[in-house]
Image: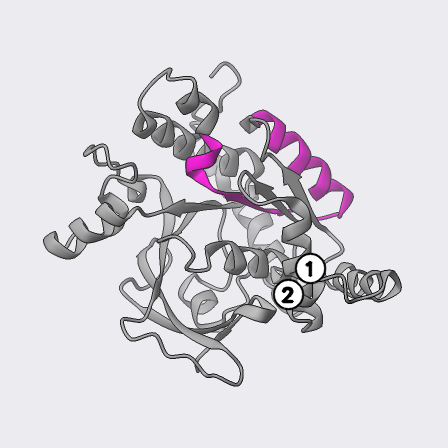
């Protein structure tokens, strides 16, 4: 890639001013009661990460229809920093409806049936915007989007918000590499690997966290259960070729449904677990129990 980042070598004596400046920034954020970077809004997870999502690549993966997109949207809307949600799968109006459902506690289906008036929809949308004024959605469902295009938009959004950090979410890493796969220019696994490297480079360009969502196919999960390996190192495409996300990621998070799915008939809450598979900033192997309310697209932590 012609415009990729090149390594920077410095003597440690030349890092003193940068170290002091970084420490002052952290101290100022702490004094103001703010985190030094985007948070997940899940207290246990934020503590495990050192208080916030540090710059670098973070992977959130699970099987289909477990809740990755809903969790990522919630994090984007509550992170306390500008956020750019790059959607390669879900239409932007559907994402907006999910945000409205979570923010206003309006059942998602009511936003689709036509029973609400235009004024009511507008009012709910306004409430959602007020909570997440610096959240933007990039629609990449019908076209490819490059690392440079994402970086340009993210930089503009970050600067417009007057922030030193931004959270970028890519949903999903597989579909981000989709155009090349469809044209048969290489194996799907090769392009997924390239997309992961690009996401890592994007984080470096922005000095910010990039949260990439990843699908686990059924054969990957079955093989992981049989071998005891982490699902993150099992082929994501069914090709039999392994690719280890952990080489690139600051954290690897796995969202799983409990073996015995517990559902409250009154509130329709599903029990899930967020497993910290890798963490360069704290403990690993920690399970964070969560409840997911589908009608409100809302995750809450079981404390």
Labelled pair 1, 2 in contact (Cβ < 8 Å): yes
Question: Of all residues shown, which one is farthest toward the left?
Answer: 227
Between residues 156 and 65, which one lies in front from this camera angle?
A: 65
User: Extreme right residue here?
Assistant: 119
> Colour mode?
one colour
What residue do we see at 54% from left, 38% from top? 88
- Which label number is shown at residue 207? none
Of the pair 92 and 199, the residue shown nearer to us: 92
The magenta-colored residue range is 148-177
Q: Disc 1 designates what residue? A: 112
Direction bottom: furthest residue: 266
* Residue drawn at (78%, 60%) of the image: 125
- Residue 278 falls left or right of residue 234: right
Q: Residue 293 in the image: x percent, y percent?
A: 52, 73
Location of residue 243 (image quadrant): top left
Can residue 48 be seen from the camera position used here? yes
Q: Is residue 216 magenta?
A: no
Image height of 144 relative to 287, above or below: above
Q: Nearer the viewer, residue 83 or 259?
A: 259
Q: Residue at x 46, y 55 (%)?
A: 68
**Mark 2 — residue?**
108
| Residue at disc 1, secondary structure | loop
């Amino acid at each position: 890639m012609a415009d990729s980042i090149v390594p920077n070598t410095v003597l440690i004596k030349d890092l003193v001013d940068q170290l002091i400046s970084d420490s002052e920034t952290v101290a100022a954020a702490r004094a103001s009661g703010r985190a030094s970077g985007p948070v997940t809004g899940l207290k246990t997870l934020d503590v495990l990460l050192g208080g916030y999502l540090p710059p670098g690549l973070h992977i959130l993966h699970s099987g289909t229809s477990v809740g990755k997109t809903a969790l990522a949207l919630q994090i984007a809307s509550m992170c306390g920093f500008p956020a750019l949600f790059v959607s390669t799968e879900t239409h932007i109006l559907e994402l907006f409806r999910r945000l409205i459902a979570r923010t206003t506690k309006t059942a998602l289906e009511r936003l689709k049936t036509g029973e609400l008036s235009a004024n009511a929809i507008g009012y709910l949308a306004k409430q959602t915007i007020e909570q997440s004024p610096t959240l933007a959605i990039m629609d990449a469902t019908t076209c490819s989007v490059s690392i440079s295009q994402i970086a340009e938009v993210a930089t503009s959004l970050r600067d417009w918000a007057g922030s030193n950090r931004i959270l970028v979410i890519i949903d999903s890493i597989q579909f981000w590499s989709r155009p090349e796969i469809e044209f048969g220019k290489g194996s799907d696994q090769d392009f997924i690997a390239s997309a992961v490297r690009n996401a890592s480079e994007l984080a470096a360009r922005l000095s910010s966290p990039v949260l990439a969502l990843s699908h686990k196919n059924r054969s990957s999960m079955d093989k992981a259960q049989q071998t005891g390996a982490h699902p993150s190192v099992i082929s994501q495409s069914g090709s039999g070729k392994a690719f280890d996300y952990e080489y690139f990621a600051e954290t690897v998070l796995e969202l799983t449904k409990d073996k015995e799915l517990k559902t409250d008939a009154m509130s329709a809450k599903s029990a899930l677990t967020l497993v910290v598979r890798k963490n360069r900033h704290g403990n690993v192997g920690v399970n964070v129990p969560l409840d997911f309310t589908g009608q409100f697209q809302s995750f809450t932590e079981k404390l």
